Amino acid sequence: MLKKRTTSPLPGVAAAGLWLRNIQLGTFALPLAFLTMLSRDWQQLSAYGLLQGFDTAVWLVVALNGCGGLLVAATMKYADNIVKCFAAALAIICSTLISVPLFHFEMKSIFLIGSSFTVAATILYARAPTCPWSPPVLDERVALLRPASYERSASVA
């Protein structure tokens, strides 16, 4: 307990779980969204109700957005922010590729170039590089900056 309180970024603050954090963020956003809805669409809400126009496709989009939010939260908790950026870029590429047959979207060459760079960067980042040799030391000041993992791998070889 003492170690947890002294090594935490904010002593005395417990780490919240994924579900609790999502509920907290949703509770913060809900009043603002409700006020915006009332100010913009009061006439239609009073005439037709809150769920007007919600068919199967809309409920599918709502479910996909909810799952996407949970996936982003899990990615941020169990991975790092770079993985989240790659996931967002790949999601944009996938949704664009799906929109080609569905909406007859025509891709431009700049999109193909950008998406190929994104896929290549994702593959290169996913491959964990290992350094079997130690980089040359030019100066003793540079030797102090060398990570210990390089020194261990050099002594093994």
Image (tube, helix red, strand yellow):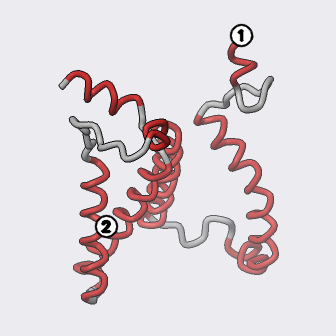
Nearer-the-camera pick, 36 or 76: 76
Where residue 90 sits: x, y (%)? 34, 63
Sequence-first tag of 1 and 2: 1
- Give the quadrant of residue 143: top left
Where residue 39 sits: x, y (%)? 81, 76
At 33% from the left and 33% from the top, the residue drawn is 150
CA neighbours of label 2 inside 10 A, class few (<14), some (14 to 19), many (20+): some
At 49% from the left and 57% from the top, the residue drawn is 65
Vertical placement of 52 versus 140: above or below? below
Q: Amino acid at mark 2?
A: Thr
Question: Is residue 106 in sight in this rendering?
Answer: no
Determine contact: label 1, label 2, CB under 8 Å.
no
Where residue 135 sits: x, y (%)? 30, 43
Judged left or right of residue 51, residue 69 is left
Q: Amino acid at mark 1?
A: Met
Q: Assign a secondary structure to mark 1.
A: loop
At 77% from the left and 71% from the top, the residue drawn is 36
Vertical placement of 121 versus 80: above or below? below
Judged left or right of residue 137, residue 45 is right
> Mark 1 sits on what residue?
1
Q: Which mark is residue 118?
A: 2
CA neighbours of label 1 inside 10 A, class few (<14), some (14 to 19), many (20+): few
Nearer-the-camera pick, 34 or 25: 25
Vertical placement of 129 versus 151: above or below? below
